[in-house]
Image (tube, rainbow, N blue to C red):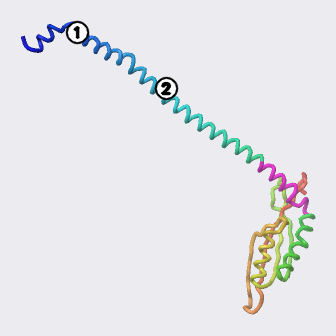
């Protein structure tokens, strides 16, 4: 009998009990602990996905809320623009620009030569606004012309510079400035 056979024969009960314990532990791990660990990791992964989804939903909600707030503010500002900034009609738009533009030219030391105004008839019939086109010809020195353009851009009257043409026929003479301007006005419900 070898050494290991003798030990096995003398300690058979303890060795069998020890092997049975190892087999029971392996079986318990394989049948209970491992599946619950997998299930637990799956639950943790689902919880992480749920948390990420919740955060994405909160961001989407905040974005949608900001969009609604922004739209409301834009609607209010647009209403203010239509009601308070735009002239109330064609005659008001003409009056608003008739004296203001020559006064700006005088203040900037630019000579006012010519002005022509026309109502743009190409706007759609259901438009809420009309357009008054203004063509002005002025002359003066470069710095004065720059000041005049700045004054027009920053004036309280709603006037848009559409086109600027600057020319000088003779180097000894002042520059000639031709401006195409637009101002808009509210139309009545019948388009007038």
Whether 110 is drawn above or below 46: the answer is: below
Could you tell me which residue is drawn at 35 percent across and 15 percent down? 28
Sequence-first tag of 2 and 1: 1
Q: Where residue 57 sits in the image (x, y, percent)?
A: 62, 36
Q: Which residue is mark 2?
A: 43
Could you tell me which residue is drawn at 80 percent across and 73 percent down? 151
Helix, strand or loop at label 2? It is helix
Please name whichever residue, 149 or 27, is drawn nearer the observer in this view of the structure. Answer: 27
Please identify the quarter of the rendering in which residue 179 is found.
bottom right
Q: Gap in Å between the C-alphas at discs 2 and 1?
A: 41 Å
Q: Where residue 45 sits in the image (x, y, percent)?
A: 48, 30
**Residue 125 visible (yes or no):** no
Please identify the quarter of the rendering in which residue 163 is found.
bottom right
Mark 1 crowdedness (10 Å alpha carbons): few <14, some 14-19, many ≥20:
few
Mark 2 crowdedness (10 Å alpha carbons): few <14, some 14-19, many ≥20:
few
State which quarter of the image contains the N terminus: top left
Whether 175 is drawn above or below 10: the answer is: below
Please identify the quarter of the rendering in which residue 141 is found.
bottom right
Q: Where residue 188 sits in the image (x, y, percent)?
A: 90, 54
State which quarter of the image contains the C terminus: bottom right
Q: Is residue 39 left or right of residue 16?
A: right
Q: Is residue 16 inside the magenta stretch?
A: no
Q: Which numbered circle lies on residue 14?
A: 1
Helix, strand or loop at label 1? It is helix
Q: Where residue 46 sits in the image (x, y, percent)?
A: 51, 29
């Amino acid at each position: 009998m070898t050494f290991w056979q003798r030990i096995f024969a003398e300690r058979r009960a303890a060795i069998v009990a020890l092997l049975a314990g190892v087999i029971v532990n392996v079986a318990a791990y394989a049948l209970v602990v491992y599946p619950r660990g997998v299930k637990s990791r799956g639950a943790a992964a689902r919880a992480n996905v749920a948390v990420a989804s919740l955060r994405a939903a909160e961001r989407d909600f905040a974005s949608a809320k900001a969009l609604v707030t922004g739209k409301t503010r834009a609607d209010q500002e647009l209403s203010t623009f239509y009601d308070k900034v735009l002239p109330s009609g064609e005659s008001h738009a003409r009056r608003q620009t008739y004296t203001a533009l020559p006064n700006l030219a005088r203040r900037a030391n630019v000579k006012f030569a010519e002005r022509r105004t026309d109502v743009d008839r190409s706007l759609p019939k259901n438009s809420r606004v009309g357009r008054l086109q203004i063509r002005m010809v002025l002359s003066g020195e470069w710095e004065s012309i720059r000041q005049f353009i700045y004054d027009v851009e920053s004036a309280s009257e709603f006037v848009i510079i559409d086109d600027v043409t600057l020319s000088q026929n003779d180097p000894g003479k002042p520059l000639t400035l031709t401006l195409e301007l637009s101002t808009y006005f509210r139309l009545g419900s019948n388009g007038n």
